[in-house]
Image (cartoon, rainbow, N blue to C red):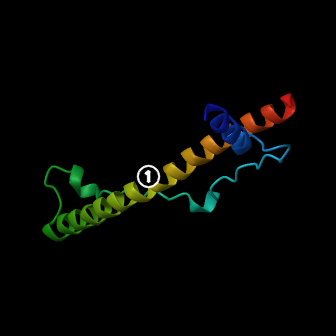
């Protein structure tokens, strides 16, 4: 029984190049898929003044900040997905390098 398992594992290749099969280089995620961080709204100059801003300007800035926060939250999940793709590429690159080393050692 143990002999069959070892034979099956040897035939499966254990993740290495199978009987001289070429190693497949990984493909990175496209650079254009990299999400862009939203820009913080420009702070009105009146916020730094002693009297502050008129009501309409303060409300407008507050609305812009709320919109930014919503965009930033959406960016977080999109950026997280992109990071996962990058991490998968790093792992695939390592696997590819190991495959090439094993191919040279055969």
Q: Inspect this view and state whether residue 106 appears.
A: yes
Secondary structure state at the residue bearing disc 1? helix
Q: Residue 53's spot in the image, x, y percent?
A: 18, 61
Quarter of the figure with the C terminus: top right
Q: Residue 4's spot in the image, x, y percent?
A: 66, 38
Q: Inspect this view and state whether residue 15 appears.
A: no
Quarter of the figure with the N terminus: top right
Please give left or right for residue 102 compared with residue 87 in the image.
right
Q: Residue at x 51, y 54 (%)?
A: 82
| In this view, 24 is above or below 13 | below
Q: Residue 18's spot in the image, x, y percent?
A: 78, 44
Q: Which residue is mark 1?
A: 80
Q: In which quadrant of the rendered view does residue 97 lie?
A: top right
- Packing grade of label 1 (10 A; few <14, some 14-19, many >=20) is few
Q: Residue at x 55, y 52 (%)?
A: 85
Q: Residue at x 30, y 56 (%)?
A: 43
| In this view, 54 is above or below 26 | below
Q: In which quadrant of the rendered view does residue 29 lie?
A: bottom right
Q: Residue 101's spot in the image, x, y percent?
A: 79, 31
Query: Of residues 10 and 14, which is closer to you in this image?
Result: 10
Q: Residue at x 46, y 55 (%)?
A: 81
Q: In which quadrant of the rendered view does residue 58 lie?
A: bottom left
């Amino acid at each position: 029984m143990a002999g069959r398992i070892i034979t099956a594992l040897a035939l499966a290749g254990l993740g290495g190049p199978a009987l001289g099969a070429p190693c497949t280089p990984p493909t990175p995620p496209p650079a254009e898929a990299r999400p862009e961080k939203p820009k913080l709204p420009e702070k009105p100059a009146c916020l730094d003044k002693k009297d502050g801003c008129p009501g309409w300007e303060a409300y407008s800035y507050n609305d812009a900040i709320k919109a930014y926060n919503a965009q930033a939250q959406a960016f977080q999940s999109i950026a997280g997905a992109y990071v996962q793709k990058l991490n998968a590429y790093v792992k695939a690159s390592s696997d590819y390098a190991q495959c090439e080393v094993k191919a040279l050692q055969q």
